[in-house]
Amino acid sequence: MAVLKVARMGHPILRQRARELTPEEVLSPRIQKLIEDMVDTMHDYSGVGLAAPQVHEGVRLSVVEFAADNPRYDVTEAQGLQVFINPEVEVLDSTEQGYWEGCLSVPGMRGLVQRPRKIRVRYLDRQAQKKEIVAEGFLATVLQHEFDHLDGRIYVDRIKDLRNLSFNEEYQRYHLGSGPELDD
Ligand code: ZN
């Protein structure tokens, strides 16, 4: 088990486009170990997802996992551990949904972000097999947040009105209940 150091906003790795992995690389011990360590890191920080650039690795790889019983989240269905490599997103329903997003790379803060409510994702899994899923609601927002990291974007870039960016304490006091939350 290895918990990796998380890059915080301001670190250049978070602003670079991460590169694709070849199927051979996906199966290599180095990337399989990175996946294990990213899962350990996500669990240690109680995130629902983590992208490789957040642990200083500029490759197109994200992990996602969450339970259905977290009262803070608007989740009806648990998401078992999923590894997304080289994901490609197609918007199926561009109707926007707003979540108060948090990010391990922007500790202590939360902001209201609007994203399309339904997407299809084509990706490679950790065995380098081609997969696709359709995601809506909470999962759709989590995945778009994660995949933004692979393109050098952070959720704060997508806050339309910066009055909806808050420290967690002030969020708890003044904004709680004004929308669902998530933390990657
Ligand atoms: Zn994030």
Image: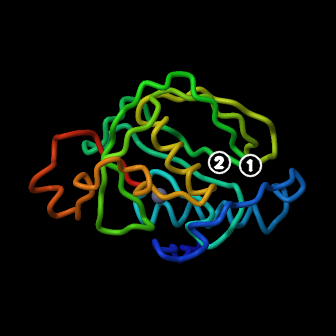
Give how far across and how far down residue 48 sits, in percent: 45, 51
* Residue named by callout 1: 126
- Please state if 127 lies on the left or on the right of 7 as rendered: right
Label 1 crowd (10 A; few <14 / some 14-19 / many >=20):
some
Figure disc tally: 2
The kind of residue on which mark 1 rests is: Arg
* Residue named by callout 2: 83
Q: Are marks 2 and 1 in contact (CB under 8 Å)?
A: yes
Rendered view: 122 above or below 13: above
> Circle 2 — which element?
strand
Give how far across and how far down residue 152 sits, in percent: 59, 60
**Quarter of the image where the C terminus is located:** bottom left
- Label 2 near ligand 1 (CB < 8 Å): no
Give how far across and how far down residue 94 sits, in percent: 49, 26
> Circle 1 — which element?
loop
**Quarter of the image where the N terminus is located:** bottom right
Of residues 21 and 156, the one drawn nearer to the viewer in this rendering: 156
Residue at the image point whose x is 71% and y is 34% from the top: 122
Report which quarter residue 60 is drawn in. Answer: bottom right
- Please state if 2 lies on the left or on the right of 43 as rendered: right
The kind of residue on which mark 2 rests is: Val
Mark closer to the chain start, 2 or 1: 2
Residue at the image point whose x is 86% and y is 53% from the top: 22
Residue at the image point whose x is 30% and y is 57% from the top: 110
Residue at the image point whose x is 81% and y is 66% from the top: 29
